[in-house]
Image (spheres, rainbow, N blue to C red):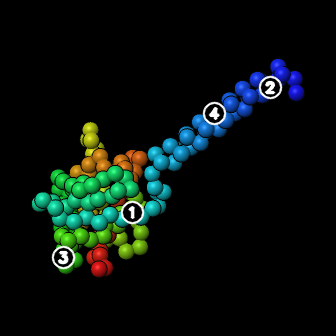
Amino acid sequence: MNSSKKPRRLLLGAVLLAAAAGVWAYLSRASILAGPSSNAIMVVAPYWYNGTWVFDDAAVGLRREPFVAGVPEMIDVLVKDIPGAKDGFRLLFSANPFPGHQKTLTWLRGDSQGNFYRLEGTSMEGWICPAMFRYYRSPPRALYVKAEAIKR
């Protein structure tokens, strides 16, 4: 091989490798930022801690994330028939209706940090904090929810 062509081929190989790495990094980041499929049903396991409902979700970096500003009272409605709910229960939620969902939270308005939702069939409003953006890129117009006992 001609020695003058060798450095050009090495340079071309390095450029192609860098481009491939950049495309891979972009696509990996894009899939992470996209969040779950819009028809995904997510599950968290809230429990009572220091006077309010909280949940952990290591997959999105949350520990003892509190529900605040009207949402604890909404949860009380959802779990009223679940014995021992304060020790933990399963909360399923999705941006799309799913079989057996219990209630719908309807988006009302956003503010600089979170979003307000109304619990179906009530006048109850609650503020869902920015932790929601760990699950959704933008606030869903509705959240379909179901609370159920954890089988122990």
4 and 2 marks in contact (CB < 8 Å): no
Percent from the top left, x then y, of residue 127? 23, 51
In primary-sequence order, the first of circles 3 and 2 is 2
SS category of the residue bearing label 3: loop
Vertical order, 126 against 103 (above or below): above
- Please state which of the two labelled residues, at mark 4 or mark 1, is closer to the viewer: 4
Nearer to us in this view, 8 or 20: 8
Left or right of residue 81, residue 11 in this image: right
- Please state which of the two labelled residues, at mark 1 or mark 2, is closer to the viewer: 2
Q: Report which residue position mark 2 lands on.
A: 6
Vertical order, 93 against 11 (above or below): below
In primary-sequence order, the first of circles 4 and 2 is 2
Which residue lies most toward the right here? 1
On the rendered image, what quadrant is the N terminus found in? top right
**Disc 1 crowd, CA 10 A, few/some/many (<14, 14-19, 20+):** few
3 and 4 marks in contact (CB < 8 Å): no
SS category of the residue bearing label 2: helix
Quarter of the image holding residue 57?
A: bottom left
In primary-sequence order, the first of circles 3 and 1 is 1
Q: Report which residue position mark 4 lands on.
A: 18
Q: Report which residue position mark 3 lands on.
A: 84
SS category of the residue bearing label 1: strand
Percent from the top left, x then y, of residue 105? 30, 60
Residue shown at the point (22%, 59%) measured from the top left: 54
- Mark-to-mark CA distance, 1 and 2: 54 Å
Q: Report which residue position mark 1 lands on.
A: 42
In primary-sequence order, the first of circles 1 and 2 is 2
- Mark-to-mark CA distance, 4 and 2: 18 Å
